[in-house]
Image (cartoon, helix red, strand yellow):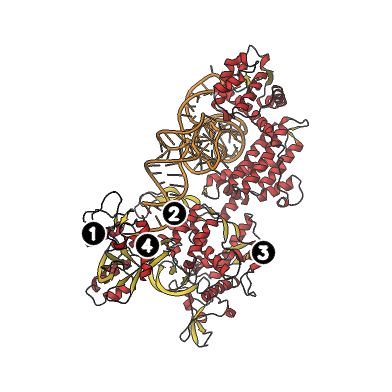
Amino acid sequence: MKYHKSFGMPAENAAIDHGANPEEWTDDNIKTMQKQQKAIGLSYDWNRLLYSHDPNYYKWDQWFFLKMLEKGIAYRQESYVNWCESCQTVLANEQAQGGKCWRCNSEVDQKFLTQWFLRIRDYAEELLDDLNNLEWPEKVKIMQRNWIGKSEGTIIKFSIVGQNRTIDIFTTRADTVFGVTFMVFAPEHPWIKEWVKGSEYEEEFNKFYDEIIRQDKFHRTDIDVEKKGMFIGKYAINPMTGEEVPLYIGNFVIYEYGAGAVMAVPGHDQRDFEFAQEYDIPIKVVIQPPDYELNAEKISRAYEEDGYLVNSGEFNGMENRMAIQSISERLEEMGMGFATINYKIRDWGISRQRYWGCPIPIIYCDECGVVPVPDEDLPVYLPKDVQFSGSGNPLETSVTFTKVKCPSCRKDARRETDTMDTFVDSSWYFFAFCDPPSMENTIPFSKEMVDYWGNIDFYCGGAEHSVLHLIYARFWTKVGRDLGLHSHDEPFQRLLTQGMINKVHPYCPKCERFAMKAEMNDKRCKFCDTDYILKSVKMSKSYGNTVNPGDIMDEYGADIARFFILFGASPESGLEWSETEIGSASNNIRNTFQFLAESPENRRTEKSIRDVLITYRLNKTCKEVTEFLEKLEIRNAVNSIMQFKKDLKTYKEEGVLLEIFEQCREKFIILLHPITPHLTEELWELIGKKGYLSLAAWPKWDDNILTDENDFKWKLINGVFDDIKSIQSILNKDKLSQITLIIADEWKFKLYEILMSLVDNTHNQGEIMNVIMKEADLKPRGKLISQIIARILKNIGKYSKVCLSTDEEFKFYSDIKQIIEKKYGCNLIISHEKNEKGNKKASQALPGKPAIIIE
RNA sequence: GCGGGAAUUGCCAAGUCUGGUCAAAGGCGCUGGACUCAGAAUCCAGUCUCGCAGGAGUUCGGGGGUUCAAAUCCCCUUUCCCGCACCA
């Protein structure tokens, strides 16, 4: 199954820039993309494709919208909204984080417009709570929690002097209400304009307002921006004290949060304190610290810690944390407030002034007002007779679209020309997979199917969607549930946030910026003429540092591209794209193919220990790879496969038992198949297998072979090779004439065994010696034993718990005698320590570590 | 300010959850060798320091601690990155 989020700006921009038809452009792109995805071997069910620009799909966006309208979840409101000048459209709050457009990164302005919203706020508490039931990265959960921004506090009603209304502000610090000495409103609060009209403050206000509103709200609320305000000639009454306090406006107050106004307590809030100092407003202390006394005249900063209440009437002496509740209760009795919860998250503005999206199914009639398009008239098709001039919404240019009869009174009316945010399309596609939507149905998908298949067990997406798609989809799921469409509370049970793909790109260290696409071939920064340096940055279209998967596949082939990606990236941390590394991936894979394709030349007929060990390695690899893949540790899986390749290669060179080699090769090919499917399929045929490899059974492993003993022997053989090699290199000997391996004496094995049984309980050498010295045959060697034990204890973890016996070890080396002799092209003598009395080196022998003499 | 992540041997980058098999995968670069008239490509080997015997020493941002044993666990600290931020 595959979903194409095919609505959106790129198609429309292509239409504006070079007159493309958005639909053809989109379809072309999808075709190319599918071709590439097929080429690289992605296993989608290509028969089940969803496209958001398919009327059969977007009909259901509209259906959802109408259902939400019915339920009061969708509503229309005039307010300040985020406006991206470059995209020529409104943005949701989530899409204007940090004051930048999520798509084009340009500055976002504020505009006062009438727009459609979805009441995601009504689900704030549930969105917050249910995060606890999700297996999501903590980072994403935290971002969502912050975004939802729950805070517990109190609504306090301040009457406006001379007016019959109250400003119902929200505060988390009701305990400081007796310390309120002024209030601050957001400049765009609609009451203000009214109040200053015709007053002495009007002129100054207008100046102030213009200045503030010209900056966007993201800039003016930047922590570094100077706090500014002005008195507007009005007063409010503190419900607890009855005192009149002056009203100010301030750039730091945000209209959308809380009531768009705050009570200011300069004694106990640093921000208010600074404002009060600037505008010469009195400061009142209402909380005293437990260990010293504040003096309102002398304090140099606000006291924000806990303490007990003073100057607070009946609440004097109360601990301030307790007082929050008491004061809230008192206010409620007075009818002047109540305890409440506030959320920072704003309702989701879904109107977009763009053509290439799902039309909002609404008709405006002069008689009937806002009229929803009746269900039976869905879908509202996106018209084709539109002009792309580059300014304004192209939909407005379609007469056939805009001119419509009112569904209720049949008089001339006009259609809503805004389309829906494309995040709407992607908020429910995952359920549509269970039962692809159809024009013929009355609901978008069947409850039975979605309940059966859903929710999504495992979802993989970018962390950049933390407070976009990932929160919208959760909201939509809850709404769907409440509409009775399915029974799931959450869309995605487990989430993995994949990393970015990075690539080096020209960067100006002075301007601290990367070159844009148009400048990427320049040598110097176009602003300051500094030489560009190369620095790694995430791939993006705006930088133009993307790689075309088609080119990579043309040059290296699909399998090498896959191998490089899977080996180079851990899903979470992403990938550094580099030409040299893909080249070496290419070598690696070609090499592997060659190795697997060629039959071994060097064959044996007699079974040897090497066959046992390579079988052990094979089983171990099967187990490791399977487990790594299950944990999605793909890089580790590939690593394990490649490690085995090395071992198998050595085995092949040393000489093989054909049957064993074939077995290893076959399983190796299967293990590699998910990584490089095409090449392994080819190999499968080459080694004479019938049928598709992709249908072959995944290799099992035999736990009976994965024994400590085999593990020990594997280490033994490699240990001896390593040791010989290292001695050889120290001695600078190119050619060896003879190697002697001297196996440790019987008593050392006994000692080793006793020692290993003791170290679980103690690492005290004295204690250990006491036990060992009880053995009559060991006692005479006390001094040597003490040295040996000290050496082993020093790094006990490096010594294996198990060991063989003298004879077994002797036999083991005899078994691999030929291999060693062949490998080093010399004679090998295997001897026992007791037969090497005069040899100084011989005494070094330990279980699992024979003394080695090379000549 | 709050929250999250990171710092590894020339470079990139694994390892950290679950301490020992870690002087630490893999790649790049570099060095040597094979092949070759030569180069490219490919293959093999080496790549912390010292050592003519398998050893020793010093390493995983810095400091301290836990432990027989620390890249890995705990505390402190520095630097960098990211998200949120005058949130009332």
The residue pinned by badge 2 equals: A520
Q: Residue furthest top?
A: A838
Q: Amino acid at mark 1?
A: Gln
Residue A633 lies, in percent from the top left, at: 59, 47
- Foreground mark, 4 or 1, reads 4
- Foreground mark, 2 or 1, reads 1
Q: Choose top left, top right, bottom left or bottom right for residue A232.
A: bottom left
- Secondary structure of the residue carrying tag 1 is helix
- Secondary structure of the residue carrying tag 2 is loop
The answer to whether tags 1 and 3 share a subunit is yes
Label 4, label 1: how far apart the Cα atoms are: 30 Å
The earlier-in-sequence mark between 2 and 4 is: 4
Q: Chain of mark 1?
A: A
Q: Residues within 10 Å of mark 2 (few under 14, many from 20)?
A: some
Q: Residue furthest right?
A: A605
Residue A735 in view in this figure = yes
The earlier-in-sequence mark between 3 and 2 is: 3
- Secondary structure of the residue carrying tag 3 is loop
Label 2, label 1: how far apart the Cα atoms are: 51 Å
The earlier-in-sequence mark between 4 and 3 is: 3
Q: Residues within 10 Å of mark 3 (few under 14, many from 20)?
A: few
The residue pinned by badge 3 equals: A47
The residue pinned by badge 4 equals: A326
The residue pinned by badge 1 equals: A277
The answer to whether tags 2 and 4 share a subunit is yes
Front residue of this view, candidates A676 and A431: A431
Picture mark count: 4
Q: Quadrant of the N terminus of chain A?
A: bottom right
Label placed on residue A568: none
Q: Chain of mark 4?
A: A
